């Protein structure tokens, strides 16, 4: 969990509070409708380490911590996911303790003008992002909210160039029958963030692996050009129309030409079709 992002939520905890005897809260580093995230120090015997603790109200109608725990346990040992430490309850809140991570890509890109990354940085990010997304998909889940703030770097010198995928509140297990992915027969509801959501998300279709990758394309374009055609538009329907308009290659006009092949592959995928992650990675290596 990232050690950045300003706190906004009101929770009944404060710095210096002790959770379950071993966690001392240091500062609030993030928040949402679910509750809040704190940096904390874990101390027991001769062990002392900084961790992140995410709190969630026990009474929350749609709990997200369960998803976090399931995903982090399923991806244990993968270098692109935070280490899971402990789950428990404290007062009227559930909590999860996990590895403390560094700033998100949006934090990094906003540090100085022109608010974009060089091509080399985008390609390095892209290769790792594909690796992380593929691992999540292989575990049987789709993220459904791929965006810059859900990619962070490590919190230590040795992990400061490593990309981590976070925030699994909207994750959903792929529909499987006898080990085979099955296309859902019913429509869903909008999931994701309007700026980065795929056309399928706007159309309220059940999201699949290709939709996570389409969101990644939008990140590439925004980081390389500094903008997206729908950047300042709030109406989701208008954003959807623009995405449909730009979907046949024109979105890539300011990008290196190889990105067109990247988009073409994703647009060719059906819900049940496994993306060729190796192809996508090789495209990025060719650009480099």
Image: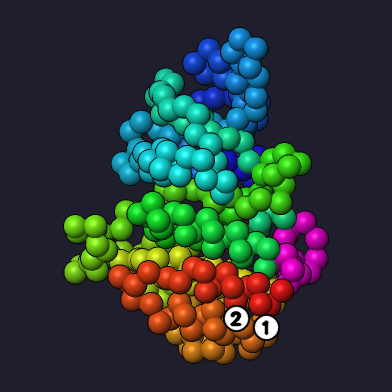
| Quadrant occupied by the N terminus | top right
Q: Which color scheme does this rendered protein use?
A: rainbow
| Main secondary structure type of the part rendered in magenta | loop
Q: For the residues marked 1 and 2, what is the alpha-carbon distance in whole angstroms?
A: 6 Å
Above or below 97: residue 47: above
Q: Which mark is residue 259?
A: 2
Residue 121 among magenta residues: yes
Residue 191 among magenta residues: no
Local secondary structure at mark 1: loop
Q: Is residue 195 left or right of residue 29?
A: left
Identify the residue position indicated by label 1 in the image: 256
Q: Is residue 227 left or right of residue 210?
A: right
Front position in the image: 132 or 230: 132
Above or below 77: residue 97: above
Q: Which mark is residue 142?
A: none
Above or below 188: residue 19: above
Can you name the residue that lies furthest to the top here? 45
| Quadrant occupied by the C terminus | bottom right
Quarter of the rendering containing residue 250: bottom right
Q: Position of residue 247 (x, y in %)?
A: 49, 85
Question: Can residue 242 be seen at all in this image of the molecule?
Answer: no
Residue at point 61% right, 64% down? Answer: 127
Front position in the image: 38 or 283: 283
Tell me if mark 1 has few (under 14), some (14-19) or many (20+) residues whose alpha carbon lies within 10 angstroms of its own: few
Above or below 280: residue 110: above
Q: Position of residue 32 (x, y in %)?
A: 50, 44
Front position in the image: 26 or 101: 101
**Image: magenta residue range:** 109-122
Residue at point 56% right, 15% down? Answer: 22
Tell me if mark 2 has few (under 14), some (14-19) or many (20+) residues whose alpha carbon lies within 10 angstroms of its own: many
């Amino acid at each position: 969990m990232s050690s950045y992002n300003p706190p906004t939520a009101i929770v009944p905890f404060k710095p210096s509070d002790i959770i379950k005897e071993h966690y001392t809260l240091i500062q609030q580093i993030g928040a949402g409708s679910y509750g809040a995230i704190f940096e904390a120090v874990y101390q027991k015997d001769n062990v002392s380490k900084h961790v992140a603790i995410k709190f969630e109200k026990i009474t929350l109608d749609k709990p997200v911590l369960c998803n976090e725990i399931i995903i982090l346990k399923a991806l244990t040992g993968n270098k692109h996911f935070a280490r899971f430490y402990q789950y428990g309850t404290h007062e009227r809140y559930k909590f999860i303790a996990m590895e403390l991570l560094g700033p998100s890509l949006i934090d990094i890109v906003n540090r100085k003008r022109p608010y974009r990354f060089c091509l080399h940085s985008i390609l390095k990010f892209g290769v790792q992002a594909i690796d992380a997304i593929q691992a999540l998909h292989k575990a049987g889940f789709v993220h459904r909210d791929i965006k810059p703030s859900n990619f962070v770097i490590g919190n230590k010198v040795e992990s400061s160039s490593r990309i981590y995928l976070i925030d699994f509140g909207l994750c959903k297990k792929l529909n499987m029958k006898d080990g085979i992915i099955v296309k859902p027969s019913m429509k869903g509801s909008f999931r994701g963030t309007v700026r980065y959501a795929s056309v399928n998300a706007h159309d309220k279709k059940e999201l699949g692996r290709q939709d996570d990758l389409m969101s990644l394309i939008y990140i590439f374009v925004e980081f390389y050009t500094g903008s997206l055609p729908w950047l300042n538009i709030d109406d989701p329907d208008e954003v959807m129309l623009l995405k449909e308009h730009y979907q046949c290659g024109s979105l890539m006009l300011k990008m290196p030409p190889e990105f067109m092949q990247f988009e073409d592959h994703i647009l060719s995928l059906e819900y049940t079709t496994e993306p060729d992650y190796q192809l996508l990675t090789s495209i990025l290596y060719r650009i480099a």
